[in-house]
Image: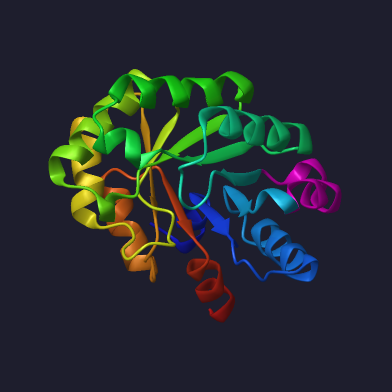
């Protein structure tokens, strides 16, 4: 794949807690320049990014990030606000406590509650693979497949580990065909990116590839 083809599959991501409006504008400019799939920003910056970039850039944001243990009602309202502010895509962190308690129905219900306010907008479900056993990863692949989500996503990038090749391959094996996969965290090179795509990733969450492309 060419660098341009890979960048078109990237959510150009900036989720630093200390980022400024200038940082947001720079990320939007880079996403437009390199034709990335979207720019992924904190909820606070969705409305300003929409005003700044107009309709020519897809804006992604995060819900219950990075811990995921907000209540379902809080996640739904956060998603509603993000949609109202102009978000095109929402990346939601699941409640891992529900998983540990084997409250599987609650996980599906929560995903669907968030999706209900997303409408046609893309909903990605972050499962934080580095905190899971293999059996838990498989269970979540099946639960996300049973929900109305559009994507399953490996990681927030804020935990001890990010995407691995093994996890992406596992997701592609156990998720339903209609569920797309987003690999995020630790994608440092274009070679890494191409590996993840070849294993089944449909989208990549990264900031490093645009930086590399600027270097080229």
Q: Determine if the magenta segment contains residue 46.
A: yes
Which residue: 37% across, 27% down?
Answer: 107
Quick check: can you spot residue 158?
yes
In which image quadrant can residue 16 be found? bottom right
Q: Indicate whether 139 appears above or below 43.
A: above
Q: Indicate whether 133 appears above or below 207.
A: above
- Tell which of 56 and 40 is nearer to you: 40
Q: Determine if the magenta segment contains residue 124.
A: no
Which residue: 82% across, 45% down?
Answer: 54
Residues rendered magenta in the picture:
45-58
Quick check: can you spot residue 119?
no
Relative image position of residue 203 (x, y in whole percent): 44, 46
Relative image position of residue 185 (x, y in whole percent): 40, 61
- Tell which of 196 and 155 is nearer to you: 155
Q: How many marks?
A: 0
- Tell which of 101 and 59 is nearer to you: 101
How is the structure coloured here?
Answer: rainbow
- Tell which of 55 and 183 is nearer to you: 183
Which residue: 52% across, 29% down?
Answer: 72
In which image quadrant can residue 89 be found? top right
Residue placed farthest to the right in the image?
A: 51
Q: Indicate whether 110 appears above or below 16.
A: above
Relative image position of residue 153 (x, y in whole percent): 39, 44
195 relative to 119 in the view: left or right: left
Residue placed farthest to the left in the image?
A: 135
Relative image position of residue 99 (x, y in whole percent): 28, 35
173 relative to 117 in the view: left or right: left
Which residue: 40% across, 38% down?
Answer: 95
Q: Image quadrant for the N terminus?
A: bottom left
Q: Indicate whether 138 appears above or below 29.
A: above
State whether the magenta stretch is mostly helix, strand or loop: helix
């Amino acid at each position: 794949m060419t660098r341009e083809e890979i960048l078109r599959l990237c959510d150009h991501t900036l989720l630093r807690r200390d980022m400024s409006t200038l940082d947001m504008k720079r990320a939007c400019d880079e996403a437009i320049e390199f034709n990335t799939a979207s720019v992924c920003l904190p909820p606070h910056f969705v409305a300003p990014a929409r005003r700044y970039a107009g309709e020519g850039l897809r804006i992604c944001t995060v819900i219950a990030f990075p811990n995921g243990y907000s209540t379902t009602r809080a996640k739904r309202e956060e998603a509603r606000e993000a949609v109202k502010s102009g978000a095109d895509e929402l990346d939601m962190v699941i409640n891992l406590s529900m998983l540990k308690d084997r409250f599987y129905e609650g996980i599906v219900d929560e995903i669907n509650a968030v999706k209900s306010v997303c409408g046609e907008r893309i909903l990605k479900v972050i499962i934080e693979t580095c905190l899971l056993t293999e059996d838990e990863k498989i269970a979540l692949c099946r639960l996300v497949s049973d929900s109305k989500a559009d994507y399953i996503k490996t990681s927030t990038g804020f935990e001890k580990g990010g995407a691995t090749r093994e996890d992406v391959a596992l997701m592609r094996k156990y998720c339903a065909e209609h569920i797309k996969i987003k690999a995020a965290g630790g994608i440092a090179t274009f070679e890494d990116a191409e590996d993840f795509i070849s294993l089944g990733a449909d989208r990549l969450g990264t900031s490093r590839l645009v930086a590399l492309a600027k270097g080229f």
